[in-house]
Amino acid sequence: MDHTSPSVRVNRDPAMTDVARLAGVSHQTVSRVLNGHPNVREQTRLRVRAAIEQLGYRPNRAARTLATGKSQLIGVVAQNSTLFGPSSLLAAFELAAAAQGFVVSVRRVRVLDRSSIAAAVEHHREQRAAGIVVIAPTAAADAALTEVPTDVPLVAVDGDPERAGAALVTVDQEAGARLATRHLLDAGHETVWHVAGPADWFDAAGRMRGWQQTLEAAGAEVPPVSPADWSAASGYRAGLMLARMPEVTAVFAANDHLALGILRAMSERGRSVPGDVSVVGFDDVPEAGYFIPPLTTVRPDFDTVAAQALSLLLAGIKGRGQGGADRRVVTPTLVERGSVGPPKSP
Amino acid sequence: MDHTSPSVRVNRDPAMTDVARLAGVSHQTVSRVLNGHPNVREQTRLRVRAAIEQLGYRPNRAARTLATGKSQLIGVVAQNSTLFGPSSLLAAFELAAAAQGFVVSVRRVRVLDRSSIAAAVEHHREQRAAGIVVIAPTAAADAALTEVPTDVPLVAVDGDPERAGAALVTVDQEAGARLATRHLLDAGHETVWHVAGPADWFDAAGRMRGWQQTLEAAGAEVPPVSPADWSAASGYRAGLMLARMPEVTAVFAANDHLALGILRAMSERGRSVPGDVSVVGFDDVPEAGYFIPPLTTVRPDFDTVAAQALSLLLAGIKGRGQGGADRRVVTPTLVERGSVGPPKSP
DNA sequence: TTCAAGAATGTTAGCGCTCACGATATTCCA
DNA sequence: TGGAATATCGTGAGCGCTAACATTCTTGAA
């Protein structure tokens, strides 16, 4: 870099050798105290720490990464959405990873298609990420993962529950849906209608399966599902249809925003909730308790999902070579509020 | 590392020298084509590219960072929340930064106090981040920024609009509040009540100021404000109070979730919206259009805020040494829906 | 034809760290 | 008290890249 004037280097960040010189030891000893190596005399350890303090020395991560060949970086691939589930998951994961001393770098993709996901993963590989997490809630996203090289640990969150051969953390959508459906049935409803999320989402598919299973197990009629996306708008549209049919007395919505739209449609049509029709949602968004009426819903614990994903990833990072196909499932719980009641007696 | 067995290096990622050897050039020439340096013959450029392709070579960022002393990394400090504003901002920023070839690393902090922020910023400095963005919506967070060294470009988002001497992007909260208040006044209301956000948030303070100014300018009475946090729960509590007072016919809530709680309280108390009382929110969360009734609200454009923050940061990264005190303000707009009407004639 | 200017490429020396190993210093038990 | 075992510390090389300089190859005009 600079071969002539030493003055240029004056304003550079202090490096390990500077600390070493000041403490009167070798740079290697400084490295040892920094990394908590045992064989360092207490007295020199203190001298080194004092020198570090005095110089305001901070280790250069890039140099360490270069020397060791491994980084402390976890790459995350997520979709560009403000959906409650994904974003709480992300926040929880970042916090958990930071607590373990990892840096997390997020790469957002606009659409969850094969090539976008692949590019994002590739990006993280280029950064020499120690591990990669992909939030892959759709079939297309999950499919992209089958193609990526396996030399860096990768865990999928919300991926295909059926797929084998990769680390995966999911919430048990079916169990959640069973909880919701059963709750409605137990309240006395003959059957339960369902407003489903987008068909290519595993979450949506799982919730639908759980709903259908429960109905069938109970010998109840399985009414046609109302297709929707995750938005309140589509919930509203579905709700408008449902409100016209006097026989619908119970609705399980695939998420809370859908439920919000349904509530609104019911209200407009003069059908009271939970008097005329009961509604259950999924997600437990923070404001769900303040819908009109307060929404009974299913709550997946995103903190736990994040923690599991991290632990799976760390296992992969440490015990390289295997540990691939582990999977963790977290079971949601039912939060009872005010949107469910008994059916109106005819 | 390995002085004995060359076989260990067999499975290592290909490096620049490998590409160079295969292409029959020097590693420096490879570096040149990688960095788009002009003086490379087209023919050799192609040879190099072919070799890169063939080996599946990917440059090692850590090595580059070490050699150049600068990274392509932007550090972001954000609070650990799923509040709509901050998380949309974050998503928008990550997308914009990625488009410019930057990696963004997010550090969440549990509380927005001085030491947490300082630690998070320090963390990014340790990573040799090229620039840092801090989402600093409270006084404490903003105060922490005055202490950080200025050798790496830093831009605050949502920071203290009054503070001088630092790059800052904010949305014009006062203007938004004026829009909302004026809209309510124009509908014929004598005055407008306000449910405010947490006092230590600049957003909340600004919205309150804008509301108060508008009232004063119009010669309207300035009623006492109802203090709240950002949650629907606290909006509900405030709404319960407001619902008891027949003279309140118009409420400006500091955000949409607060408004949701208010809507719920009004509904419970039998006061119709917008028949008896009109409500305006702030944020335009995606589901605001499906509240009961659909919420008229103020929409800040987070994409623009993110874009401005990035452009400010890049300016700081490029034109080192100055460019400090620039600031950008983005003005929100009013979204009219169904929660505002004329006051009931007495 | 010739030689200087510029284009194209190569060579060398670090960036700041860790790893492997060698060199001392210290300890402990026979 | 001696020397092997152990603790403590230092030395040298190299991680993969870029900056600066050196060198060779092309041009084009005298």
Image (cartoon, coloured by chain):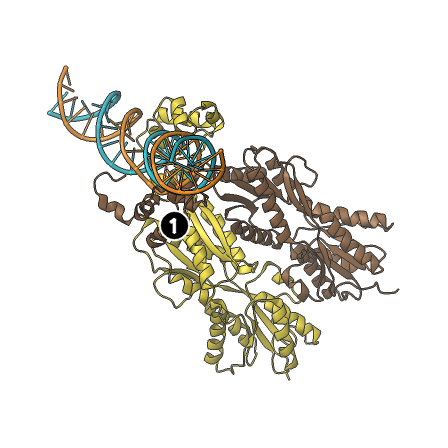
Chain colours: A brown, B yellow, C orange, D cyan
- Circle 1 SS class: helix
Residue A112: in sight, yes or no? no
Pinpoint residue B289: horizontal percent, then vertical percent.
62, 62
- In the rendered image, which quarter is residue D29 located in? top left
Identify the residue shown where x is 71% and y is 58%: A297
Q: Which one is nearer the viewer's eye here, A214 or A154? A: A154
Task: Establish if D5 lies above or below B226.
Answer: above
- In the rendered image, which quarter is residue B241 located in? bottom right
Pinpoint residue B174: horizontal percent, then vertical percent.
46, 70
Which residue type carries mark 1? Answer: Gln
Quadrant (top left/top right/bottom left/bottom right) for the C terminus of chain B: bottom right
Q: Which one is nearer the viewer's eye here, A44 or A66? A: A44
Q: Tag 1: Cα neighbours inside 10 Å, few (<14), some, or many (≥20)?
A: few
Quadrant (top left/top right/bottom left/bottom right) for the N terminus of chain B: top left
Q: Which chain's residue wears label 1?
A: A
Identify the residue shown where x is 48% and y is 26%: B8
Pinpoint residue A21: horizontal percent, then vertical percent.
30, 45
How many badges with numbers are in the image?
A: 1
Residue farthest toward the bottom in the current orientation of the protein = B346
Q: Which one is nearer the viewer's eye here, A11 or A195? A: A11
Pinpoint residue B329: horizontal percent, then vertical percent.
42, 62
Residue A327: in sight, yes or no? yes
Task: Establish if B275 lies above or below B17.
Answer: below
Q: Which residue is mark 1?
A: A43
